[in-house]
Amino acid sequence: MKKRILHNRLSVCSSLLALLFAISLFSSCSEPEYAIVSEGNRSSDGLIYSLYENGSAVITGSDTREDMILTVPATADGHRVTRIADEAFSGRTDIYALIVMDCGTVGKYAFSSCPNLTYAHIGGVSALETGAFCDCSNLTECSGTGSLKSIGPSAFSGCLSLTSLSLPEKLKSIGSDAFSGCTSLSSVVLPGSVRSFGVRVFFECTSLAYADVSSLGSIPDYTFTKCTSLVFPVIGKVSSIGKEAFRSCTSLETVYLPKSLKTVGEDAFGDCGSLTSVSYGGKERGFSSIDFTSGNEVCTRSFISYGSKPAGPLDLSRTPDKSSYTSPAFIAAGKEEYTCGEFTYLLDSDGKAQITSYFGSEYEMTVPEELDGHEVISIGQSAFVNNPILLSVDLGNRITSVGETAFYCCTSLREVKNGGSVRLVGVEAFGNTPWISSFGSLDFVIAFDSVLLAYNGSSRFIRVPDGTKSVAGGLLLEKPDTVFVYLPSSVRCLGPQAFSFCDKLKLVYGASVAEAGDACFSYCTSMPSADLPSLSVTGSALFSDCYNLRHADLGNLITRLLGGLFYYDQNLRIICVPASVTEIRSEIIDSCMPMIFLYEGTAGRFSEISVENGDYYLSDMFLIAKEDRGIAGK
């Protein structure tokens, strides 16, 4: 009987080996190695390629040496391009933009150390091999990644300016050091398809504020080491956290550990000086069974909550909210002031009124619905400033905006009624009043049902409450340590200077923000990128003096780019201009010179845009329209 069982087992093993050999043979037959037919061929557009037996072409270089947009077409002299060869363009200083139309593989170090490469579009590329773009210090954006299945080791390591990269659902593997040293990368979301993940993938990504790695079963060694801006890591059902995985994440205040966790590697949370809270998904007994190796004492010293649920992934989709939006901002038709009773006012082009001053003596005042027959919709800058006797004001339900310092230093104001229609509130509109003080130390002061007037917390990560519709001007003027602000989909309006002078701010995400007031992000000197896909109305100087801003994407709804928009943004490399733009003010890039203008329409349509003072300031930039990337224009 034993001999028969052994014979059966040997038979099964032999069958399995035969099957594996057949599969291997079939695989090798399905992807045969083809011999080179000829080398050094020159295509009509200057590309050098090798031709193979199967008729495919591999790009090995180009014979043009001038400042250029390098385009790799889908075919070279009629031969399908399947690969860009190893080191094909390594070290080239004359390539400023790369557009790959349709190519299967980018070889090892193909574009490594190209110091002026600013933008890459890799259409049809399924594999980036080792070091494909490593040490491209000015590479700011890599688009067209929808076909990517594998990112090789060190593919983008040392890309100091890379701010954004979309990781598609087809992606299966990411090699070691793939993004190490990408010091401008501010957020990353791993797709659920990723199954292979190397070590040190995000090592020293110092601007990385948000990372969703919930698809991983374990977090490898050194994954987030020295990610000094990381405040919100989303961890899934991992069984292990590797050596030094979060070491020196100095902005990390709280971390969730799942009940599936068994081991935590040496110094995984070492030097995390801000970590004061640990949320554990299981019970205390389960937490005590986790093998915390040396250097993780902070986890056991921190405040621990048991039975916690993980913080869900944030919605970082870029789908613009195209629902209709009416700006609450009051735009005066002229400077002439009118007087009616105890008020002076201005009129807008629709004949609606803004109160500019009040010289009455009422203790309890109701804002009139009309002045001289004109509907009152706004309270202007400093309209009631320093009024010492006003105890109560009723805003009614027609006022849409309250201007800067409108009620500032009204030292008796204890009650503000109604205001359900208010959507835009200026800087210090109610500053230094007993009414504001009455909210006490609440982290979030929300008034008029949906306006965030103040934030009193101290967290580096601010998650604005759901249901908030607008953020008041100057919200974070006194919160310079803020690293990451997440705005829910309900937020449509940001007041003037809402985040200005937040010099450590790395990421503001607001997928539905339709309006941002004057200087909303001015002097956010650490912010590497701007991504507001639903923006349709913008104030002036929106991103002025953002010295480290490298990439700005304003979605596809905005029509006017106003003066001073990117004033003195000396490191700005890419501006994405939506096809909806009809007017550009010439001073939008005063004192800075971006390299790439990505236009979401056709080149012909771009030529129809009204540009104040001509387009001389575009002469040193590359205009890349949609058709240039092999994408149908709008």
Image (cartoon, rainbow, N blue to C red):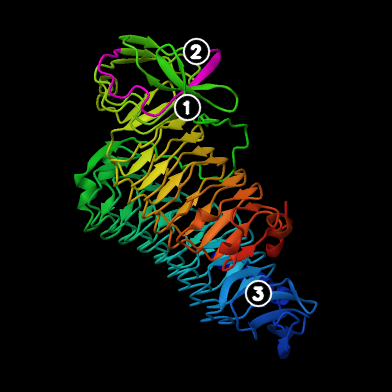
Q: Which residue is mark 2?
A: 369
Q: Magenta segment: does it hold 306?
A: no
Q: Magenta segment: does it hold 370?
A: yes
Q: Position of residue 594 (x, y in %)?
A: 51, 63
Q: Nearer the viewer, mark 3 or mark 1?
A: 1
Q: Position of residue 135 (x, y in %)?
A: 45, 74
Q: Residue at x 54, y 81 (%)?
A: 92
Element at badge 1?
loop
Element at badge 2?
loop
Give 539 or 345, whichever is nearer the viewer.
345
Q: Amino acid at mark 3?
A: Phe
- Mark 3 or 2 closer to N-term? 3
Q: Amino acid at mark 1?
A: Arg
Give 345 or 569, whichever is nearer the viewer.
345
> Looking at the rendering, which quadrant does residue 619 occupy?
bottom right
Q: Amino acid at mark 2?
A: Glu
Magenta stretch prevailing secondary structure: loop
Q: Which residue is mark 3?
A: 21
535 relative to 401 in the view: left or right: right
Give 295 or 371, whichever is nearer the viewer.
371
Q: Name the mark on residue 423.
A: 1
Element at badge 3?
helix
